[in-house]
Image: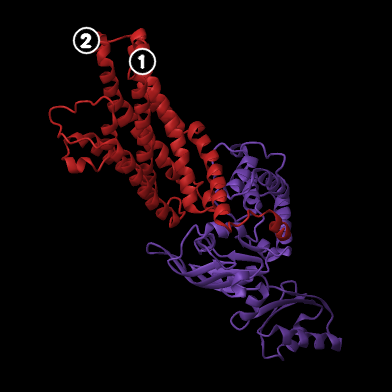
Amino acid sequence: MSSTAETFQAKPATTHDSRWSLWLRQVAAIMRLEVEKNFFGKRAVLVYLLAFMPIGLLLMIAILPPGTRDWLDFAQYPLLFSIIYNALILRTVVFFGCAWIFMNLFRGEMVDRSLHYYFLSAVRRDVLMAGKYLSGLVTSIILFSVVTVVSMLLIFFPHFYSASVRFFLDGPGLVQLFTYAGITILACIGYGAFFLIVGLFFRNPIIPALLLYGWEWLNFLLPPLLKKISVIHYLNSLVPVPVSEGPFAVVAEPTPAWLSVPGLLIVTVLVLVVAGSRIRRMEIRYGGD
Amino acid sequence: MTVASEQTITFDNVSKFYGEILGVNRVNLAIPPGITSLVGPNGAGKTTLMNLMTGLLRPTRGRLSVLGIPTDQPEQLFRKVGYCSQFDSFPRGLTGREFIKSFLMVSGFAGKEADELTTEALERVDLVAAANRRIGAYSKGMRQRVRLAQSIAHQPSVLILDEPLNGLDPVVRAETIALFRQLAAEGLHLIISSHILHEVDMMSDRVVLLNNGYVVAEGAIHGVRDEMDVEHPMQVLIRCDQPSLLAARMFRDDNVVEARLHDDRRGLFVKTRNPDRFYLLLNEVVAQGEIEVESIAPVDDDLSAVYDYLIGAQ
């Protein structure tokens, strides 16, 4: 056995290039396992239910349109979608969907008592974290981008077909569609990193998730400086059709895209660095962790 | 790092506390190749020691390395180490083959290589026929074997096995013990924890006896037993035609502390602090031709006795 071990053992990384190719191979192997689990595991049911919420609601509206003035005026539709996107898709579906997907990347495996198989593999723990995070991203981005796109199409086309075709092909519709999908992707990146680290630090991650949910919802009441310590502030700044936050909202200058997008990405990287350091020191003590 | 430490599993004053609860305390060990068994009652610290060796736990104090590799470097450590833990759980939805191959690929093996190693490991534990069934449908013994296959699939130099014979039927147990012996003969380090003492006795080169988080004895079983001769004199049963006469002769030796007739009066139990001198004296008595000896057998020169003396009495 020991003699054949020389032949078969995964080659130790010696050069910079071979190290990177090993890490990429390992990340791909982790993603293969995790993406399948994220899409087809038992835990995926809740994410699908969440994802179906706006689509179901808009399907119902398509079948039974409300008689209110807003729904009879095509010019109001971009604003209507923006309201639905903000309140339902971004703050509820994407938020809780990411919470469920990313917190379960590590916490779920601890509950299932199967995380040790990763920890007993010849893989750096930060590479493991990268693989798991990317698998969460692939899952959430595919799922919630589809929800965003389908929801937008569902709000426009069933009611005003010809106007909708013109809006998307000749008007600002397509740009708005891509912008909303882009915001969804950024939300997955930002919330994903946050919930990954919550899953690593907290045995019961529901409480910190709810605290963040409250913080994000109350964002409109916060003074401008505190507004900036949230994900939703930067995402709202990117929305193509701004939504009024009501008479009690504290108005703050929106952060320009050239600042909010890289800012969100930098914060995400910093959170992932902290998560990497945490996972390097992590112990497996199922039940006692 | 010395050459010796690159060939051993080294614990240097290692302690592990779970909050205020003691896991293991001040462990100093240098485990060479061969089969080493960790023996002790529940809560003695066997699994803690194994989890420390594999980096699943970090020591509160002290340092340890496996073949010179610190245990906080999994990317190096698990090229050399395989661990079959006691956790009877698996990632959901995988077949036996997918389970083994997936984690080989996580370790960096390419697809074809991983396939070959997976098949080889499945063959070694005789699980090829069930390899494409989901692990969820496996029996306990099959789950134990698939975990064993996963731990040996990458052909490690050190194999750590936590209660590896649990759940196996007698035939598979015997085959598994034979596999362990074969692996040890190939130069591997095998660290095995077990509570079935006669099996440990059969397969181990060395034992580490643990109790309440402390190493109470370590070394070759007979070596450990020899060191206990003063406190626990060795007991030998001599089957012969005149046990009373033999008893009288034996008491000429100051090291003989007790002689007791067997219930059937066809044998004599003798306790001696110096077995070597005792056997010499016995040879002399037999050579004189007065007593006819049928058989001589040590009664407590095994792991069970060592365990009873060191741990069972506490």
The percent coordinates of residue A204 (x first, y second) are 35, 45
Chain represented in purple: B
Residue A184 in view, yes or no = yes
Judged left or right of residue A61, residue B278 is right
How crowded is the residue under tag 2: few (<14 C-alpha within 10 Å), some, or many (20+)?
few
On screen, residue B155 above or below A199: below
Q: Is disc 1 placed on a helix, strand or loop? A: loop
Indicate how the structure is coloured in the image. Answer: by chain
Chain represented in red: A
Labelled disc at residue A69: 2
Q: Earlier in the sequence, mark 1 or mark 2?
A: 2
The one of B203 and B248 positioned closer to us in this rendering: B203
The one of B229 and B4 positioned closer to us in this rendering: B4
The one of B14 and B308 positioned closer to us in this rendering: B14
**Mark 1, residue position:** A170
On screen, residue A239 above or below B184: above
Judged left or right of residue A253, residue B242 is right
- Mark 1 to mark 2 CA distance (whole Å): 25 Å
The percent coordinates of residue B263 (x first, y second) are 71, 72
